[in-house]
Image (spheres, helix red, strand yellow):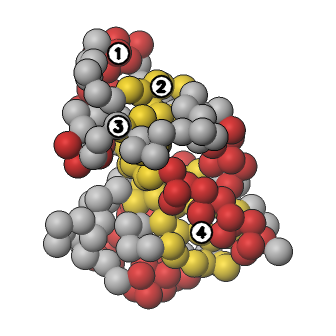
């Protein structure tokens, strides 16, 4: 059965949109998904479904979150293979990386328009770097993500698409957990 990773945007952040992970697992199970597991409190759900269309999955999850919790939460769906490709195609190597540098990925719900990409590409920072590759914005943060110009909200506003951001360690852990769950 196909395996997916749902990444919910903006839950359990600053006391907003609080969802307990056992409730989130139950919600996914109520949709008929199997082998449901969560990782940390930021809304990362690994699950299996016989549905082959990620957009259908996303729409069902978004609707159920709205129905059960009254939260309108953007959800990004990726397969473990897609997340592995995100890691493999990173423009920022982790080998011999500066210990002060942090890597993040912002996963986009859909491809932005060319005009929206131009809006983002005109944004520069003296400290941080980013590159857009497909449905992923790779971030190299040299100080503190909380102080970076390239927040999730900033990227969403410039690109005009829903997005969610995860740090490098979380992305790699999700890939590992998905592999463990598939065995």
Question: Secondary structure under badge 3?
Answer: loop
Q: Residues within 10 Å of mark 3 (few under 14, many from 20)?
A: some
Q: Quadrant of the N terminus?
A: bottom right
Please tell me whether residue 38 is drawn above or below residue 156 in the rendered image: below
Residue 183 sits in which quadrant?
Answer: bottom right
Can residue 126 be seen here? The reply is yes
From the top left corner, tell me how far across and down residue 36 is, in percent.
60, 78
Q: Earlier in the sequence, mark 1 or mark 4?
A: 4
Residue at label 1? 121
Residue at label 4? 46
Q: Residues within 10 Å of mark 4 (few under 14, many from 20)?
A: many
Say if mark 1 contacts mark 4, CB within 8 Å. Answer: no
Q: Residues within 10 Å of mark 1 (few under 14, many from 20)?
A: some
**Camera-nearest residue between 8 and 39:** 39
Residue at label 2? 132
From the top left corner, tell me how far across and down residue 63 is, in percent.
38, 64
Please tell me whether residue 108 is drawn above or below residue 133 in the rendered image: below
Q: Relative to 160, is 169 on the left or the right? A: right
Q: Earlier in the sequence, mark 2 or mark 3?
A: 2
Q: Earlier in the sequence, mark 4 or mark 3?
A: 4
């Amino acid at each position: 059965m196909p395996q997916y990773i749902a990444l919910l945007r903006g839950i359990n952040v600053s006391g907003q949109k609080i969802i307990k992970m056992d409730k989130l697992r139950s919600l996914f199970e109520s949709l008929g998904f199997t082998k449901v597991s969560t990782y940390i409190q930021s809304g990362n759900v690994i699950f299996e479904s016989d549905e082959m269309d990620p957009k259908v999955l996303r729409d069902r999850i978004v609707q159920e979150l709205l129905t059960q919790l009254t939260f309108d939460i953007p959800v990004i769906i990726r397969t473990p293979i897609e997340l592995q490709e995100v890691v493999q195609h990173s423009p920022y190597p982790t080998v011999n990386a500066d210990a002060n540098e942090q890597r993040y990925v912002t996963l986009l719900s859909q491809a932005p328009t060319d005009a929206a990409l131009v809006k983002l590409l005109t944004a520069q920072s003296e400290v941080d770097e980013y590159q857009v590759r497909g449905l992923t914005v790779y971030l190299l943060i040299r100080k503190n993500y909380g102080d970076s110009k390239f927040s999730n909200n900033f990227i969403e506003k410039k690109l005009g698409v829903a997005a969610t951001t995860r740090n490098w360690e979380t992305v790699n852990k999700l890939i590992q957990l998905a592999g463990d769950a598939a065995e």
